[in-house]
Image (spheres, rainbow, N blue to C red):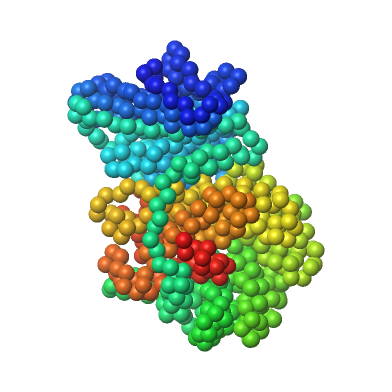
Amino acid sequence: MMAMASLSMMACTSKETFHWQTKAGGMYLLSADKTVVGQLLDNRPEGMKVAGEITQLDSSTFRIVRRYTAVQDIDSASLSLDFRHHSRSRFWMIPAVSYNGNHWGRGKEPKGAEENGHWRTFSYRRTPIPGATYSEGDRFAVATWNDTPTSEYQDFSCSLAPEESQTTHRILWPEEELPTMYSGRDRYGDGYKKHVRLKKGDTVTLTLYLAVNAVEPDHQAMHHFLRKAWEYAQKPIIPVFDTQKIWELGIRYATESLWAEEGSFKGFSIGLVADGEKGWKQRPGWKYEIGWCGQNASLANSLLTDYIRNGRTESLNKALATLDTWANNCLLPNGLFVTHYDNILNHRDNSVMDACNLGTAALNFFEACDLTRAAGVGRPLYERIAYNICNFVKADQQPEGLYARGWTPDGKCFVREGTIGCFMVPPMLEAYRRSGDSTYLVSAIKAYNYYLNELKTDGYTTSGALDTWCIDKESSTPLLQSSMMFYEITGERAYLDNAVFVSYYLSTWLWHYHGIYPENDNFTVYRYNTFGATSVSVQHHHLDQYALSWVSDWIKLADLTGDSQWKEKALAIWRNGAQLVSDGTLEINGRVRPAGSQNEAYFECNFFFEANREERINSWLVAWPGAFRLETLRRLKDFQLNK
């Protein structure tokens, strides 16, 4: 360990809440009352000299630069730059990777900060802010992150080591993932460490952004670091089709490629998969879903909107056929609704109807009632279905407020745990807004408070990504939507503040940069930019476009709060989610994609579904991204996105 006595200090502000002091053993960060917050340390091999500087960016944020120069040839170089917080961690996080150790859930994602006595290390590509780590001690909250690499030579990793009396935030060069590598859902591979030789005179630069704030209730100290990370992030403008073309392509994909008729079913397939040749076919199993991945109800509402706006009779006919199919065959006597039509076709009665699909169905059937009325073909049954779903869930609600993850057809609760139950809050609020029946509002308030308090206490939400059982981002989206709806209904500022609170949690999943990939990599060849994407969950370490579902809420939030970051982030999400939408000629990995199609998963790190690790852009052309783009365009005016 070498002290940083050679560092020069360059303050950019006259107000210093924290300041550095050189003492025996290194550089120490002190608070205004001279409490030692932590220590800056570095590890480097013999044969390297170091220089650098600390720039104070504001009263509590610093940019620390270390330049390591080889004074002799080094066969295998290894460097790390640490900030050792002199406190145990009460809560810690590697955004999108680990939330206090990932101990919630039934998956086999990385649990805890160490494995077999070794601290886990992760490539920066797994983190939405390059190499970000965060911890809350007894008094202070500390966050560190790095600049985005501009070449593969700069690839690095991060680690967080929470111990009994100290917490070490670390960046490491060159890139490594040790002691094992999380390589797929619940799968691990051998760990790796890149081997880099340095010649005499070669230089390596490590940059550590350090943000320190007083610990705040409900983990709100992380908001300071997240605001700064976004402020300092480069924000590329990704070129995409204009909103009118996105709309047209979305309608085409729904009507030309996803449309399916099978037995009593008329509606939309969940998506296309590659066939045995060079073409595509609808997925042969588990095909028809009302919400989540299948999005039959939302796609039908977009077709109704298309008919109202553009007069296309085909859109009207297919929308009504879809909604009527579900409405006439899926409503159960107890008020529940069959969410997967495969169960109707295959005469299965042991399925689970989850809160995500049910909430989506109820909200969309409310909207469909209004749209059919506007189209002159009213369907009051749609509204009754939505009310029936709400009535069942309301009656099943537990005294403390929570709903459930799902129910069996006979009305028995499948399981209660998880934030996923919150997907029923928005339709409950819509039921109140339409009927004036206060029992819906009371139910929504109880559930909302329960799930929001879980987020505030735990620092994460859970169980919304239905193909996992873990901490994720999807489960918090109804909290954001509910907060915005509560504010519209009540006008109470507290709900707007809650929307901001949830939005910062969602920001821990949002990619603030574009990573660097080899010249022959899928991302490079097809010009996919990671900026504005979101990681799925701690069990699924890949990117997707799910954040499209909250673009309209963040644009509204920016207008209501005057905080431009939410609109900036919303537009970044929109542009990211509108990348690589096929115009009917787009060829990726040897297959021309149908008009309006787009794949679901982008594998930004060493995590893949299958063994083929050359295709970072997968070939699962699922329905939901197009449905979410159309849904966003139903809610917003063109000028709000065409900028």
Measuring from the top left, give residue 209's x and y in whole percent.
Answer: 45, 34
Q: Write down the quadrant of residue 413 in the picture.
A: bottom right
Question: With respect to residue 394, does 416 lie above or below?
Answer: above
Q: Residue furthest front?
A: 14
- Quick check: can you spot residue 43? yes
Please determine whether, in this image, residue 145 is positioned above or below residue 583: above
Front-lying residue, 215 or 611: 215
- Indicate the quadrant where residue 555 lies: bottom right
- Residue name at image x 54 percent, y 59 percent: 551
Residue at point 54% right, 82% down?
307
Q: Residue at x 30, y 68 (%)?
A: 587
The number of numbered badges drawn on the structure is 0
**Where does residue 382 sit, x and y in percent of width and height?**
66, 78
In the rendered view of the protein, which quadrant contains the N terminus?
Answer: top left
Query: x, y percentage for residue 321?
Result: 55, 84
Q: Nearer the viewer, residue 147 or 480?
A: 147
Q: Is residue 249 left or right of residue 292?
A: left
Is residue 511 shown left or right of residue 631? left
Residue 545, image x and y in percent? 46, 59
- In this image, 461 relative to 613: left or right? right
- Residue 624 in view (yes/no): no
The residue at 47%/64% (across/down) is 642
**In the depicted view, which residue is nearer to us: 530 or 538?**
530
